[in-house]
Image (tube, grey):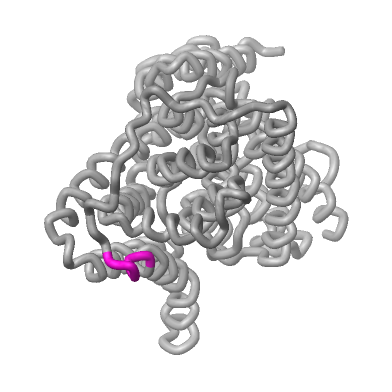
C-alpha cells in the first residue's frame, strides 16, 4: 500500500473521529486535508489555497442558491406555523395509536415539499414528543422515526423530490429530478417497507417489555394555540409544498414542450423554491410581522449548512489531487458487476467518509462522473439510471455517527448515540446501503 493511500485513509479516519467528537468540520476538514497532502507528497499551501479552496468555492458557487432558498422556505413554513398546522392535522387523522406513522408521514411530506431536513427536525420533534407521550412509547425511539422520514426516501429516491441529493446528479448526467421513475419507485419500496416495519417492531417490543415514556427534562413545550390560527391554516402547509413540487417537475416540462426552452435543473430548483416562499408569504399575510424575521433566520441558517458541506467537498478535492486517489479510482471502476455497482460503491464510500450525502456524491461524480457517463453511452444505458443509483447511494453510509444531521437530531431530542443511534443506523444507513448495492447489482444484470 502506497504512503499516499495510507494518507487518504488516515485523513478520512481522522475526519470521522473528530467530527464524531463534535468538532466543527470547518476547521477539521482543512486539517485532515493537510494530513492527506503531506503523506501524499503534495505541497501544503498548494493543497489548501489551491485544491481545497477551489473545491469548496465551486460547490458554494453552484449550490448556494438552493441552500439559501431552501433554508428561507423552511423557516417561513416553520415560523408562520404552516408546517406545524399541517402536521397537527395529520396527527389528528392518524391518531397516537399509530405513533410511528404519525411522525414519519409529516416528515416525508415536508421533505418532499422541499423543506430542509434540518428544519424538519426542529419542526417535528415537539410534535413527535407529544405523540410518543400520548402513545406511552420511550422517547429514545423518536429520533429513529424522525430520521426515517426526514433522511430517507424523499431525500434520494422519490421521483421529483427537490432535495439537493436528487439535484446534484443532473449536473453530471444531463437528467432531471424525475430520472429513472421505475427504479425510483422500486427503491422507495425496498427502503421504506423494511425501515417502517423495523420501527413498528421496536415500538411493539417496547410495549411488550413494559417500557414507558420518560419526559425530556430539557424540552419546554410551547402552547401554539396563542397564535390563534384559523382552522383552515393547514392549507398554508400543504399548498406551498404542492407548488414547489409542481414548479420543479411540471413547469420545466411545459416550458420545453410549448416554448422550446430547456430549463437547467439548478435553475428549476431556484424558481420552485422562490414560488414556494411567495405562496407561503401570501397565504400568511396576516402574520406579516413574522415573515421578515423568518426570512432573516433562514438566510443566516443557510450559511452553516452549506459551509459544512462545502468544507467536506474541499477535503475531497485534496484527496483527488494526491497519487493515492488513482488507486481508489481503479478499485471503484474495477468492482465486479456493472458500472452501476461501481458507482454505488464509490458514492457510498465517499458519503460515509465525509459524513455528507451531497458532499460525498459531489466528490465521487466530479472524479468519476465523466467516466461513468462515457461507459453508459457505449452500452446504451439510460443516464437516468446512473442518476438514481448515485442519489440512492448518497443516502447510505452518509449517516454514520459523525453525520451533521444525525448530531443535530440527537442534540435536539436530547438523546445520546447509545440510546438512539441504533435505530437511525438501521433505517437510514444499513437498509439504504444494502438497497443501493443490491439494486445496482440487479439493475446491472439487464444492461
- Residue 273 shown left or right of residue 264 in the figure: left
Q: Is residue 116 left or right of residue 299?
A: right
Residue 351 appears in view: no
Tell me if I can see residue 148 in this picture.
yes
Q: Is residue 36 magenta?
A: no
Magenta range? 230-234
Q: Above or below — where is 2 with respect to 199?
A: above
Q: Does the magenta stretch include residue 233?
A: yes
**Is 202 in front, or is 398?**
202
| Viewer-nearest residue: 353 or 403 | 403
Q: Where is residue 396 in the image (x, y as percent from the top left)?
A: 64, 38
Q: Which residue is drawn at 75% across and 65% down?
A: 380
Q: Eyeballing the image, is 143 above or below 225? A: above
Residue 156 in percent (x, y) is at: 58, 51
Task: Give the quarter of the figure containing the C terminus.
Answer: bottom right
Q: Could you tell me residue 440's position as x and y percent?
A: 77, 49
Q: Which residue is drawn at 37% across and 53% down?
A: 84
Dominant secondary structure, magenta: helix
Residue 356: horizontal and vertical position, in percent? 51, 35
Looking at the rendered image, the quarter that the N terminus falls into is: top right
Taking depth in this image into account, of 135 and 295 the one nearest to the observer is 135
Seen at 65% across and 35% down, the residue is 429
Q: Residue furthest left?
A: 289
Amino acid at each position: 500500500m502506497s504512503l499516499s493511500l495510507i494518507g487518504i485513509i488516515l485523513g478520512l479516519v481522522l475526519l470521522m473521529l473528530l467530527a464524531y467528537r463534535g468538532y466543527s468540520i470547518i476547521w477539521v476538514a482543512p486539517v485532515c486535508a493537510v494530513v492527506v497532502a503531506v503523506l501524499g507528497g503534495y505541497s501544503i499551501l498548494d493543497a489548501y489555497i489551491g485544491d481545497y479552496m477551489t473545491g469548496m468555492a465551486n460547490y458554494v458557487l453552484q449550490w448556494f442558491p438552493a441552500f439559501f432558498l431552501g433554508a428561507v422556505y423552511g423557516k417561513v413554513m416553520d415560523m408562520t406555523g404552516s408546517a406545524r398546522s399541517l402536521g397537527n392535522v395529520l396527527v389528528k387523522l392518524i391518531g397516537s395509536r399509530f405513533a410511528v406513522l404519525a411522525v414519519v408521514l409529516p416528515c416525508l411530506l415536508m421533505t418532499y415539499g422541499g423543506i430542509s431536513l434540518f428544519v424538519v427536525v426542529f419542526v417535528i420533534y415537539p410534535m413527535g414528543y407529544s405523540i410518543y407521550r400520548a402513545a406511552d412509547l420511550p422517547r429514545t425511539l423518536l429520533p429513529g422515526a424522525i430520521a426515517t422520514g426526514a433522511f430517507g426516501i424523499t431525500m434520494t429516491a422519490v421521483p421529483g423530490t427537490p432535495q439537493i441529493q436528487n439535484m446534484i446528479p443532473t449536473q453530471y448526467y444531463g437528467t432531471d429530478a424525475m430520472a429513472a421513475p421505475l427504479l425510483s419507485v422500486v427503491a422507495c419500496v425496498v427502503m421504506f417497507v423494511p425501515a417502517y416495519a423495523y420501527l413498528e417492531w421496536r415500538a411493539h417490543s417496547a410495549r411488550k417489555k413494559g417500557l414507558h415514556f420518560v419526559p425530556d427534562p430539557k424540552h419546554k413545550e410551547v402552547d401554539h394555540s396563542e397564535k390563534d390560527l384559523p382552522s383552515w391554516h393547514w392549507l398554508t402547509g400543504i399548498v406551498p409544498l404542492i407548488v414547489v413540487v409542481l414548479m420543479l417537475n411540471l413547469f420545466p416540462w411545459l416550458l420545453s414542450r410549448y416554448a422550446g426552452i430547456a430549463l437547467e435543473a439548478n435553475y428549476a430548483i431556484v424558481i420552485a423554491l422562490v414560488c414556494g416562499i411567495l405562496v407561503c408569504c401570501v397565504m400568511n399575510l396576516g402574520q406579516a410581522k413574522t415573515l421578515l424575521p423568518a426570512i432573516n433566520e433562514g438566510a443566516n441558517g443557510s450559511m452553516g449548512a452549506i459551509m459544512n458541506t462545502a468544507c467536506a467537498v474541499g477535503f475531497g478535492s485534496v484527496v483527488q489531487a494526491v497519487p493515492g486517489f488513482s488507486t481508489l479510482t481503479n478499485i471503484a471502476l474495477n468492482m465486479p458487476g456493472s458500472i452501476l455497482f461501481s458507482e454505488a460503491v464509490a458514492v457510498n464510500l465517499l458519503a460515509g467518509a465525509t459524513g455528507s450525502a451531497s458532499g460525498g456524491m459531489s466528490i465521487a461524480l466530479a472524479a468519476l462522473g465523466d467516466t461513468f457517463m462515457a461507459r453508459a453511452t457505449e452500452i446504451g444505458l439510460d443516464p437516468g439510471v446512473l442518476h438514481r443509483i448515485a442519489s440512492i447511494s448518497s443516502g447510505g453510509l452518509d449517516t454514520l455517527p459523525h453525520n451533521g444531521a444525525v448530531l443535530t437530531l440527537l442534540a435536539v431530542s436530547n438523546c445520546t448515540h447509545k440510546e438512539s443511534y441504533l435505530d437511525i443506523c438501521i433505517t437510514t444507513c444499513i437498509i439504504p446501503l444494502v438497497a443501493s448495492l443490491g439494486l445496482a447489482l440487479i439493475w446491472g444484470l439487464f444492461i
